[in-house]
Image: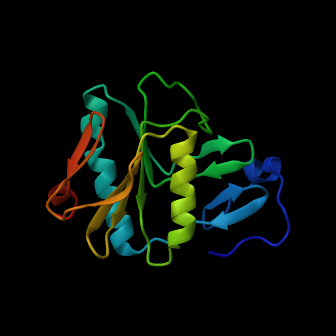
Amino acid sequence: MAKTSAPVSLEEYFDTSYEPECEYVAGELLPKALATTAHGALQARLGYLRYRYEEAGLCRAYLSLSLQVRERVIYIPDACLLSPDNKEHGIVSTPPLLCIEVLSPSDRFGYMMKKLDELFCWGVPACWILDPEDKKASVYDAEGLHPVPVTGVLRTGSFELALTELWA
């Protein structure tokens, strides 16, 4: 993951569009890994599946929503579920109920773990990590990172999703 060489102000980050999309950590732009077709297909499937939670009134679901975790840290998970009471617009500064990351081949494990740890410390109860290339899934929560069997179910609070629905 390439980083910018000169620090960027938070104001400049908010006023600029980046291609590829960038996360922001203490003045550094961290480009998100480029999506593969498997990544894009899985993210689209998540977009479709998330409506069951919205229809049940459990959340408001978003893809690629900017989260301001700290004053100078902006992360953009592939999907997240906000409380139905959260009425924030634009950059969200209240922890979601769940964040979901879809891995790309170029994602770095160390960066992903740092990001997941920060999201958890900020107040996100759990993050689901999905690997579309190997059809694997893990949950990061208070107990750490743990894999979910290929025929298992991802569960966090009121949210659950059978992996067979994702890999169909």
Please state the horizontal and vertical placement of residue 138, each as a whole percent of the image: 33, 59
Residue found 82% across the figure and 73% down from its top: 5
**Rendered view: 98 above or below 25:** above
Please provide percent x and percent y for residue 31: 63, 67
Report whether 53 appears left or right of 163: right
Looking at this view, is 65 or 125 the one in front? 125
- The one nearer the camera, 9 or 110, is 110
Residue 137: quarter of image: bottom left
Residue located 28% across and 48% down the image: 48
In the rendering, at what x and y percent does residue 76 appear? 55, 53
Determine whether 35 is above or below 88 in the image. Answer: below
Q: What colouring style does the render use?
A: rainbow
Identify the residue at horizontal 45%, vertical 55% (top origin): 78
Q: Is residue 13 left or right of residue 33?
A: right
Q: Is residue 75 left or right of residue 59?
A: right
For residue 76, say whether it is visible. no
Q: Quadrant of the C terminus?
A: bottom left
Query: Which quarter of the figure is the N terminus placed in?
Result: bottom right
| Residue 4 horizontal side relative to residue 53, left or right | right
The residue depicted at 25 percent of the width and 27 percent of the height is 56
Residue 150 locus on image (x, y percent): 18, 65
